[in-house]
Amino acid sequence: MNYYQTIYTFNSNFERGNFGEAQAALAKDKKAETRKTKLLYYMNMGVVASLQGNYAESNVYFEKAYMLGEDYQVNYLNEAASFLLNPNIVEYKGEDFEILMVHYYKALNFLKLGDKEAALVECKRMDIKLSKLSSKYTSENKFQRDAFIHLLMGIIYDANGDANNAFIAYRNALDIYQNDYHKFFNQEVPQQLKEDLLRTAYVNNFSEDLRRYEKEFGMQYKHDKSKKGDLVFLWHNGLGPVKVENGINFTILRGQGGVVNFTNQDLALNFAFPMDDSTYHKSGLSSLEFIRITFPKYVERPALYNHAQLVWNDQSYPLNLAEDVNAIAFKTLNQRMLLEVGKSVLRVALKKAAEYTMRKENDNAGALIGLVNAITEQADTRSWQSVPHGIYYTRLSLPEGNQQVQFITKSGINAGMEQTHPMNFDIKAGKTLFHTFHSLEMSAPITAVSGY
């Protein structure tokens, strides 16, 4: 049973938009806060509370998730047990992008509560976390910088009237979109980011930067002197992927120089472990010809809608993709997949070798070990499944007062399918209003996306 099935009642209610029932399903588990999955419990409780408009309650859960991530201490006994038995023995500490999403949700909640100072604190926490991640990953071929977090920092600085820091954050986001995101995800720079970068360059009197970016973007900035307020609209589209268990067969080959190779020619995978002859025979590996390992892989849940726009006063404002959460999830898992597969290969091989060795002495005892091995060998399928598939956004500058805006979503999968949501916003001059909308509709899952 994978983790999605373990909390199926929560997932099924959440996917139907029954957030109260989803929250009740989580709360029903009285031991949730003591389990190895309590980080995911706090994350899911934070999301459903936020979607119900309970922003303060939501942040209580997200703060617990943050503290859990900060206080996480390696339990070496459990780590060793996870290596010998299965990775579910250890506490789930979250994917890096999941931890960053905690700060994102917290910042949004604070903005909706009107607490911009607290939102800035989350910006600084994000900045610290991003610095740690940059130190953790040094290879240029590793995804290590998050453009959306810098973009969000810019938006929050902007809302606080700090045009200088907003410009810096927007400029950092631009660099990451142009280089990392284009290379890893083929994702373009959001048009709204270009417009915000030009505006903050103008406000800061950075004339040289303004001219340079106007030329680079092929855009001419015109400053609007009228006194308006801003609406920053964030669209959480679809749902992120889920992890399931996958398996690969490996052939065991004794190589030269005391190296044991575990090979899968179809996937061009080879894991070599140095081992002298006595250890090789004593461990029982010489009795094995092949093994099968299990490991996690993501299954995409494609969003049904992939285009959206806001319409005000007969003018249309498209929402730009700012963060492809689904693509980042696949990328981060694939980046460490070779390490995960390598650990699984050696773990399963040693367990299988122990079974064969025991069978030579006592067939029943060997069979029992084999049964235990089969039961305990499980992939770690835990993941945060209530995050969106993608995050889109745009900014509207609107006159003060009540403004009627239509939010229209369109499907690129089912032609002609669209939804229109009329909304009213109380705009105040010189202020920024934040609004989020989550579309939960999705198409049939795609199972063959992972590289393995």
Image (cartoon, rainbow, N blue to C red):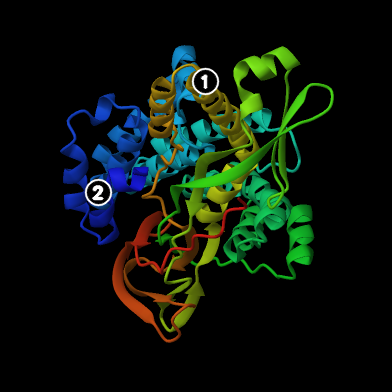
Q: Nearer the viewer, residue 93 or 210?
A: 93
> Picture coordinates of residue 58 (x, y %)?
28, 40
Which element is circle 1 on? helix
Q: Residue reaching furthest right?
A: 257
Question: Which labelled disc corresponds to residue 270?
Answer: none
Query: Is 224 drawn above or below residue 24 in the view shown?
Result: below
Amino acid type, mark 1: Lys
Amino acid type, mark 2: Phe
Q: Which residue is mark 1?
A: 360
> Picture coordinates of residue 87 (x, y %)?
46, 29
Q: Is residue 286 left or right of residue 360?
A: right
Q: Nearer the viewer, residue 442 or 279?
A: 279
Per the model, the C-alpha gap separating discs 1 and 2 is 47 Å
Q: Is residue 135 left or right of residue 48?
A: right
Residue at horizontal 56 percent and vertical 67 percent from the top: 224
Question: Which labelled disc corresponds to residue 10?
Answer: 2
